[in-house]
Image (cartoon, rainbow, N blue to C red):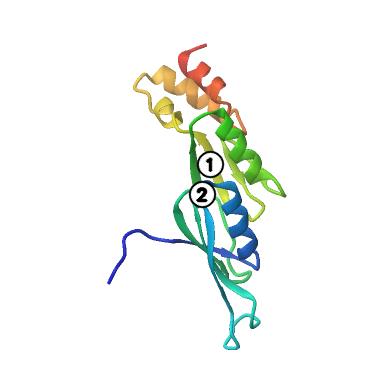
């Protein structure tokens, strides 16, 4: 029997429970669920957390304490489509806090090394505008920013 949907598994090195609680505190429609622990069978020390199930924005995740073998890279990122500057500011601040790293063009890494794109939902339409001059202005503006400024993107797109 199969179920609809899928669950994203995030590999951590001992931070799975901390990360799950952090993400559940940042996003709406979020909660921490089942926590499983290593048994005497290993491979981790008995009683330590192996997985933590959680939801963020209604999406299912499992945080796995798999060890130091694998690290997050920018090859995989989560894009947050924001309705307005207030949302952009909120997510940017919450995801960078505690040791995250701001990056260019709306990208950042959180304190766990997970990459995020915090973007206004309308950005895609701006940079794909059939009017190439508008699209180019919006793209140039985006490329000059760290955290995205929606008013400046709109201004650039409009030609102002």
Indicate the position of residue 69 as horizontal and vertical percent values.
60, 70
Q: CA distance from mark 1 to mark 2?
A: 7 Å
Q: Nearer the viewer, residue 34 or 118?
A: 34
Above or below 154: residue 109:
below
Instruction: Name the side, left or right, on which 99 lies relative to 116.
Output: right
Which residue is depicted at the point 57% across and 34% down?
Answer: 88
Residue positioned 49% across, 49% down in the render: 29
SS label for mark 2: strand
Residue at image point 52% right, 46% down: 28
Q: At numbered mark 1, what does the secondary structure look like: helix, strand or loop?
A: strand
Q: Is residue 57 above or below residue 123?
A: below
Mark toward the start of the polypeptide (1 vs 2): 2
Farthest residue toward the left?
1
Question: Measured from the top left, where is residue 11 in percent x and y?
Answer: 55, 65
Q: Is residue 87 above or below residue 28?
A: above
> Quick one: which residue is furthest to the right in this view?
98
Where does the image place residue 20, in percent across and percent down from the top left?
58, 59
Q: Quadrant of residue 121?
A: top left
| Whether label 1 touches label 2, CB < 8 Å | yes
The image quadrant that residue 124 belongs to is top left
| Number of on-image labels | 2
The image's mark for residue 25 is none
Name the residue at the bottom extreme: 40
Please identify the quadrant where the N terminus is shown: bottom left
Mark 2 sits on what residue? 77
Write the residue at 59% across / 47% down. 26
Q: Residues within 10 Å of mark 2 (few under 14, many from 20)?
A: some
> Would residue 81 be found to the left or right of residue 85 on screen?
left
Residue nearer the viewer, 51 or 130? 51
Q: Residues within 10 Å of mark 1 (few under 14, many from 20)?
A: many
**Where's residue 66, x and y in %?**
58, 71
Residue beneath disc 1 = 117
């Amino acid at each position: 029997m199969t179920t609809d949907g899928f669950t994203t598994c995030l590999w951590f090195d001992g931070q799975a429970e901390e990360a799950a609680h952090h993400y559940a505190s940042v996003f709406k429609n979020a909660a921490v669920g089942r926590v499983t622990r290593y048994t005497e069978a290993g491979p981790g020390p008995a009683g330590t957390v192996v997985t933590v199930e959680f939801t963020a924005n209604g999406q299912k995740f499992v945080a796995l304490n798999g060890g130091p073998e694998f690290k997050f890279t920018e090859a995989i990122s989560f894009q947050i489509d924001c309705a307005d500057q207030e949302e952009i500011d909120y997510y940017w601040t919450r995801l960078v806090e505690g040791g995250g790293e701001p990056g260019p063009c709306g990208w950042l890494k959180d304190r766990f090394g997970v990459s995020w794109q915090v973007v206004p939902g309308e950005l895609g339409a701006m940079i794909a505008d059939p009017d190439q001059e508008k699209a180019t202005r919006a793209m140039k503006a985006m490329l000059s920013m760290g955290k995205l400024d929606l008013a400046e993107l709109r201004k650039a797109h409009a030609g102002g």
